[in-house]
Structure formats: structure tokens, C-alpha cells
Image (cartoon, rainbow, N blue to C red):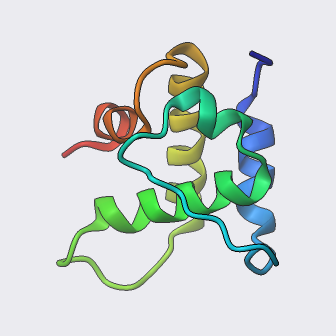
Amino acid sequence: MKKITAPILLAAALALPSAPANATVLDLSTMTCKQFVEGGDDNIKMVLIWMDGWYKGDSDEAIIDTEVFTENAKKFGTYCGKNPTISIVNAAEAVLGK
């Protein structure tokens, strides 16, 4: 597995172009960190955006704080790089769980 650094994940997350032309189904309940890291920029962006929304919950406002988003993306990327076999759901819980 190639090493993915936080700056690459950050750049991918912040670029945020429109959704890919070809529809893709992502089963986040079974996706591993390795699949996330190797999934390409579009999949990485979608997962990071999902994760940001999921962990805000219903009580938070519909605001994206880019500093918090970036820090969480770095933490998540680092964690997944070190734990390629863990599911992204478990990784998100380990990194962002409240």
C-alpha cells in the first residue's frame, strides 16, 4: 500500500469538484481504510464529507468549519494509513467519536 500523507488527503478534500460523472455505490459499512486510501480523490472527498456530517449530528448547524474539517481529515488519513485493515466506520469512531 502506498503511503498517503495528510497533505494529499487535505488537497483532495479541499478541491471538492462536482460529483464524478459515473455513478458509484460506496458501502461505507464495509469499506476498509486501505480501500478508502486507494479509492481515488473523488471517493476520498465523499467519505470525508460524509464523516464530517455524520459526526456533527442533528444538533449542529449546517456549517463546515474548514479548519476543523482539515484537521479531522489529517487525523483520519494518518489513522487509516497506519491501520489499513480497519473499517472506515471504526476508524471514524476512533478518530472523531464523541
- State the image quarter where residue 6 is shown: top right
Q: Is residue 29 above or below residue 26?
A: above
State the residue lying farthest toward the bottom: 62
Query: Seen in the image, is 62 located left or right of residue 77?
Result: left
Q: Is residue 45 above or below residue 78?
A: below
Q: How many marks?
A: 0
Q: Residue at x 45, y 53 (%)?
A: 27
- State the image quarter where residue 53 is shown: bottom left
Query: Seen in the image, is 97 located left or right of residue 85?
Result: left
Depth order, front residue of 57/30: 30
Residue 58 image offset from top left, x and y in percent = 20, 77
Q: Residue at x 50, y 56 (%)?
A: 68
Residue 54 image offset from top left, x and y in percent = 33, 63
Q: Is residue 37 above or below residue 27?
A: above
Query: Seen in the image, is 67 located left or right of residue 93?
Result: right
Residue 34 image offset from top left, x and y in percent = 61, 27
